[in-house]
Image (spheres, rainbow, N blue to C red):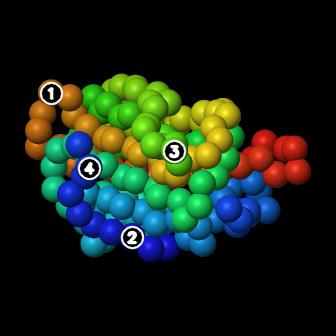
Amino acid sequence: MRKRIGKPRGASSPAGSDDGWLNLSEIATVEVTSEDDRFPIESVFSPDSGPGWRASQPGQQLIRIVFDVPVAVCRIRLCFHETESERTQEFSLSWCLATGGSREIVRQRWNFSPGGSTTEFEDYAVSLENVSALELSIQPDISRADQVATLDSWRVGQLQNGIRG
C-alpha cells in the first residue's frame, strides 16, 4: 500500500478480493496526519489481524483513502478498540465525489471504558458512485486533548456480480 504522512486538508474496474472487500493496496493511496511506527496504517486494511493504527501525537487525526480511479462503494466497515483509557471518541466518515465536493456519511460518538465497552464495530450499507476518496476524521476524546487516536480495521466493499460485499 502506498501512503503519505502530512498535514490534513481543512476507469478501470478496481481490484477486489474474493469476499467482496476492495484490495486497497492495489487501487488507492492512504494519507494520514500522523503514525506511530509500531502501529502502521497498512495493518488497518489487511484482512489478517495486525496491530492496528495509532497516531504518533494526540488530538484530531485524518485518514484519507484516495482511489487511483473513482469507484462505487456499497459497504464500509470500521472497528475501533480501546482497552487502556476511558474516553469519548467522535469520528466522522465522509466521501469525496470525483466531480468535486464531499459529503458526510456519518458522525458518531462512542464511550470507551476499559472495564466495560472496549470495542466499537460499525458496518454501514451505502450506495455511493464515483467515489474519489473516503475520509475518516477521528477526535480521540471530545473533552481531553491528550488522547491518541487509534483504529483497528477499515474495510471498503463494492458490488460484485450484483452481490453486496
Residue 143, by quadrant, is top left
Looking at the image, is mark 4 or mark 1 earlier in the sequence? Answer: 4
Residue 164 in the image, given as x and y percentages of width and height: 78, 42
Q: Amino acid at mark 1?
A: Ser
Q: Amino acid at mark 2?
A: Lys
Compute the Cα span from label 1 to label 2: 30 Å
User: What number is the disc on residue 160?
Assistant: none
Camera sees residue 82: yes
- Residue annotated with mark 2: 3
Residue 125 in the image, given as x and y percentages of width and height: 66, 33
Q: Nearer the viewer, mark 2 or mark 3?
A: 3
Q: Amino acid at mark 3?
A: Thr
Looking at the image, is mark 4 or mark 3 earlier in the sequence? Answer: 4
Question: Residue 56 versus residue 103: which sits nearer the camera?
Answer: 103
- Residue annotated with mark 4: 9
- Residue annotated with mark 1: 143
